[in-house]
Amino acid sequence: MRRSAVIVSRALVDLVRRPAVTGLTIGTVAVVFLLLGLFGLLASNFSGLADKLSSRLRLTVFVDDDCQRECRQQLQQWLQSREAVAAVVVVERQQALEDFRRRLGDDAHLLEVLGENPLPASLQVELRPGKRRTEIMAALATQLEKLAGVEEVQYGQRWLGRFFRFIRVVRTLGLVLGGLILLAAAVIVSNTIRLSVYSRRQESEIMGLVGATPAFIKAPFYLQGALVGLLGAGLGVGLAYLAFLVVAPWLRMPVGLGQSSFTPAFLSPTTALLVVAGGALLGLAGTAASLWRHLRK
Amino acid sequence: MIEMYHVHMSYGPDSPALTDITLRIEKAEFVFITGPSGAGKTSLLRLAFLAEPCQAGQMLLFGKNVARVKRREIPLLRRRIGVVFQDFKLIPTMTVRENVGLVCDVMGIGGRERRQRINEALRMVGLEHKAGSFPLKLSGGEQQRAAIARAIVNDPPILLADEPTGNLDPELSRAIYRLLSEINARGVTVVVATHDIDWVRRTRKRIIEIDRGRVISGGMPDA
C-alpha cells in the first residue's frame, strides 16, 4: 500500500513539476487521437452508409416484351433456386409505372406527357444479407443476361463499384496514416518520459543501491506514460465528439429516392472507452521504449 | 557476515580491481579497510553490497553464497546493508528527511513507523534540526551525517562506509568515528574504507590492508 502511494506520488510530482512539457505532450496525444477519431468516424460512417445501401441493394431484371407469364415464372424459379437470392418479386409494367409515379411525388404530372407506359416489366431480386456484395451481384447478372427473356440486368454496378473502392481507400489510408501518427505519438510520449528518467537518473541509481527493485524504480515512469496517454486520448476523443456534434447535422442524407435517410453516428461508448484505453497503452509503449534505452540496468 | 575466498574482480580485461581476495568479517565487528588511493577499497565495498559481480572465487554474505543469489533477490539483500558513499549520494531535490525516508519508501515502511525511524536516525546523527533542509544547504560534515542516517534508518545488520571522513577536518572525523562506533555498539557490523592509516591505527580496530587489489594483511579475524 505504502509502495503504491510512493509510486503514484513520484509519477504525479514529475508531471506537475513540468507543466509545459506535460501539457504539450497531452496536447500532442490529444491531436493525434482527434485525427484518429475523425478518421475512425469517417471510416465507420462510410461503412454504416455502405451497410445501409447494401441492405437496399436489389437486382432489377428487365424482361423483354415477349417474355410473358410462363417465361417470367421460369426466370423466377431459376432465381429462387440460387443460394444468394432471398426473394423475387415480379413487377408488372403497370405497377412499375405506379411505383415511379409515387416516387416522383409532386413531379408525377410529368408522366402525363408520355402517351403510353414506357416501363418494362421486371423481376426485383433481393439478396440474402451476407450476399449483398457487388461481385456476387455481378456474377448473378452475367448468368441472368444469358437467359432467354432477359433484356437487361441493373444493380448500379458502376457507382457501387466506385463507392466500395472509395471506402476501401479510406480504410487503407486511415490504417496507414493512423499507424504513422500513432508511432509519432509514441515517440513524443517516449521523449517526455525520457526527460523524467534523466531528471531522476541519480535518484533511480540511489534507489537501486539502497535496495529498490527495478519494478519499483520503473513503475512511476510507466504510470506517467499511461496517464499522459489516457488524458491525451480522452481529450482527443472529446474534441472529436465536439467536432462530430458540429458537423453531423450537415451530413444527414437521403438514401435512395424517397427512402429513409442516413444519420451519421459517433463511436459507441465501448469503442470510445477502448480508444481512450488505447491511449494509455500508447503511453505505456512509449515509456517502455524510453526505459529500454535509458534505464536498462 | 562477509566472507570472501580467492575473489577476483576486474572492470575489463586489462584492469583487474581485486585479485585473490580472502577475508572474513564477523558479526558486530568494526573493521577498517585501508590502503592508498586506487588500492581497491571502493571496489571491495561495491563487491560487498553486490553493486559489482564476484567474477571468480567465492563470496558469502549473511552465510549465503552470492553466486547462487538470483538477480531478483539482490535488492532484498541490499536492504540488509547500509551504505555510506564517498560522495554521499544525497538527492539534492529532496530534503534531509525525504532522503532518509527514501529507504523506508523502498522497503514499504510508512505512517508512524516511518516517521519514528527517520526521527530516530536523525537524532542519532544529530541532524533533527536540519530535517527540512536540502543537502546543498548543509556543510560537508552534515551531509556525511545525513548519509549515515539514511544508511541506518532501516537498522541494517551491516554498515559499509566509503571514506566517511575523507573531506572532513580532524575534529569532524573524530565525531563521525564516534558515531560509527555507537552504531557498532548496537550490534551492527561496520566496515569503513579509508586511506587515513595513521588515524585508523589509533582506533585499535582490526585493519584489513590492501594494495593494488590484494590483501596485504588482516584479512582474517584474530583467532
Image (cartoon, coloured by chain):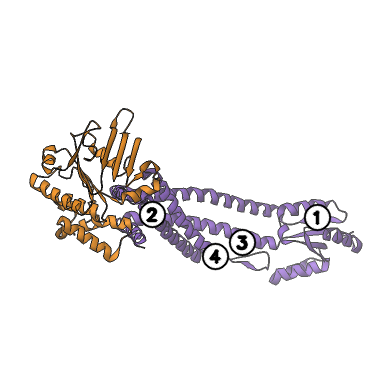
Chain colours: A purple, B orange
Q: Dot 2 falls on which chain? A: A
In primary-sequence order, the first of circles 3 and 1 is: 3
Which of these two is toward me, B122 or B197?
Answer: B197
Q: Are marks 3 and 1 in contact (CB under 8 Å)?
A: no
Mark 1 surroundings within 10 Å by alpha-carbon count, few (fewer than 14), some (14 through 19), many (20 or more): some
Q: Are marks 1 and 4 in contact (CB under 8 Å)?
A: no
**Which one is closest to the eye, mark 3 or mark 1?**
3
Q: Are marks 3 and 2 in contact (CB under 8 Å)?
A: no
Q: What amino acid is at disc 1?
A: Glu
Residue B45: quadrant of the picture: top left
**Which one is closest to the eye, mark 3 or mark 2?**
2
Q: Are marks 3 and 2 on the same chain?
A: yes
Which of these two is toward me, B113 or A75?
Answer: B113
Which of these two is toward me, A233 or B159?
Answer: B159
> How far is the residue under mark 4 from the one under mark 3?
13 Å
Question: Pointer 1: what residue?
Answer: A152
| Vertical relation: A67 (above or below) B217 | below
Question: Pointer 3: what residue?
Answer: A48
In primary-sequence order, the first of circles 1 and 2 is: 1
| Residue A14 visible in the shown view | no
**Which one is closest to the eye, mark 2 or mark 4?**
2
Q: Dot 4 falls on which chain? A: A
In primary-sequence order, the first of circles 2 and 4 is: 2
Q: Position of residue B68 (x, y in %)?
A: 40, 43
Q: Position of residue B87 (x, y in %)?
A: 21, 44
Give the structural element (helix, strand or loop) at label 4. loop
Furthest residue toward right: A70
| Vertical relation: A104 (above or below) B107 | below
Q: Quadrant of the C terminus of chain A?
A: top left
In primary-sequence order, the first of circles 4 and 3 is: 3
Question: Pointer 4: what residue?
Answer: A268
